[in-house]
Amino acid sequence: MGEKFVADRFDLAARQEYRARLNDCLTALARMLREERFEGPRDLIGLEVELSMADSGGSPRMVNDEVLARMATNDFQSELGQFTIELNMPPRRLFGRVFDDLAEELRIAIGYADRMAGEFGAGLVLTGVLPTITPEEVAPGSLSPGDRYTLLNDQILAARGEAILLDIAGAESLTHSFDSIAAEAACTSVQFHLQVTPDRFADTWNAAQATTAAQIAVGANSPFVFGHELWQESRPQLFLQATDSRPPELAAQGVRPRAWFGERWIDSVLDLFEENVRYYPALLPLRDEEDPLAVLDAGGVPRLGELALHNGTVYRWNRPVYDVADGVPHLRVENRVLSTGPTVTDVVANAAFYYGLVRALADQREPVWRRLPFAAAEANFQAACRHGIDAEFTWPSEDGAALVRQPAHRLIGERLLPLAERGLEAAGVAAPDREQYLSVIAERCRRRVTGAGWQTRTYHQLVASGADRSTALRELVRRYCDLARTDAPVHSWPAGV
């Protein structure tokens, strides 16, 4: 993308110019939707997997540049922290033995990256937040080199006008201030992409929002942050606070954070892009040389560079994505709620559950979002983050006549898993794939075990055996990594120490 700074300082005039550019992008996108310029296959999926690197004692290893330089592949790239890397899987159709193929490719890629990291005294840790990481290890110097990382950090701190404060109360309480956004680097997630046509986008996004709480309940995997036991899935709250550009007084007034669940069901993808431009000041003053309206007038396909860049700094848990591949524009829903891990099998099971349930909910004649208030969907999300598999959800009754409260593990096991199976079947996913990977989710529900549950139970057993906090967390990470490398799903891991 041909970019240049709008101005040496991102002052008021530069912001006004940038807002005008964003509005041009919105106008171009609306025109493309009206003129039906979008093409491409339905149900094309893709994954991004973020991975932490730690030494034998569980401390983060700041070696991502060295590891990436050694790799003979472009599938990996740097992430915000020098102890993190990201794997980008090529897109594929949601069809046939897609999940078995995906699992095999992931095992090969992650195994390769683990070997490369081993040459620099590191190993991969597939979790949402490395339990052993300390606040001192996410100082500004731990950020990966790169102008955008530096610029994003500077702009968020300038907008806040003060240090970033983490204040999370769960099983324990964590309060700590940071003079950079480096605490966000502790968050490692898996992102599920789903390409859809414009007429299906709103239904798919709404379905993804309704699905989010169930995903977290069965996929929670980040109970520890900077040595403190917080929520079963602490990563969303850590991410929200670590990237919060609002001064406290604006937060108290209800100004929206950049990490956002949303506030309503939508009718069009334009609803989301328009909200992003309306509610959020641009953070990255980079301008694309392209004139999107002129490109459209000439019969071309605009990149919408400013809109895509701005969209990347609004961290919706289900993010709308506009992209161009081989000259063809398309839309995707990017699902960003789940922590990485614990194993490849668990990640692929999470993917199967997500894609199947979203497909089934989006296909319903009487969609769940017509019966479930948006505020209830957000409350489910918060409950899942706090309590994981032990959360209680509000959900429409089977006859749709009322809203009922139900334990998450029962709702998922009895009603949502059969829906996910039907969604995968409708997409053409082979029966062996459906059975193999959805059975992993079923067993987590039956045994009420997740990655977070295994971590907290093991930690408390180690402490009860006489270990201090630091020793228990290091031993927890060691055992976790040993078991993760077997690729046995987390519900089957031994519970004793």
Image (cartoon, rainbow, N blue to C red):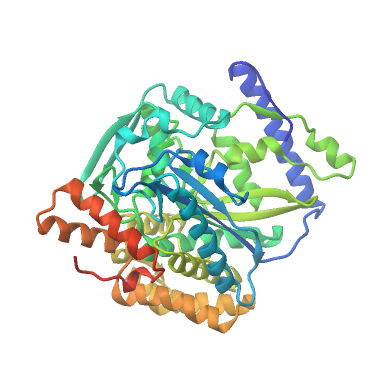
Image quadrant assignment for residue 181 = top left
What residue is at 43 percent from the left and 59 percent from the top? Answer: 377
Q: Position of residue 103 (x, y in %)?
A: 53, 68
Q: Nearer the viewer, residue 176 or 141?
A: 141
Q: Position of residue 468 (x, y in %)?
A: 14, 48
Q: Give the quadrant of the N terminus.
A: top right
Residue 237 drawn above or below residue 19: below
Q: Nearer the viewer, residue 496 or 41?
A: 496
Q: Position of residue 419 (x, y in %)?
A: 50, 77
- Res 77 visible: no
Q: Give the quadrant of the C terminus.
A: bottom left
What residue is at 17 percent from the left and 48 percent from the top? Answer: 469
- Res 223 visible: yes
What residue is at 54 percent from the left and 71 percent from the top? Answer: 356
Residue at the limit of the structure toward the bottom, as seen here: 431
Residue 72 as seen in the image, left or right of residue 186:
right
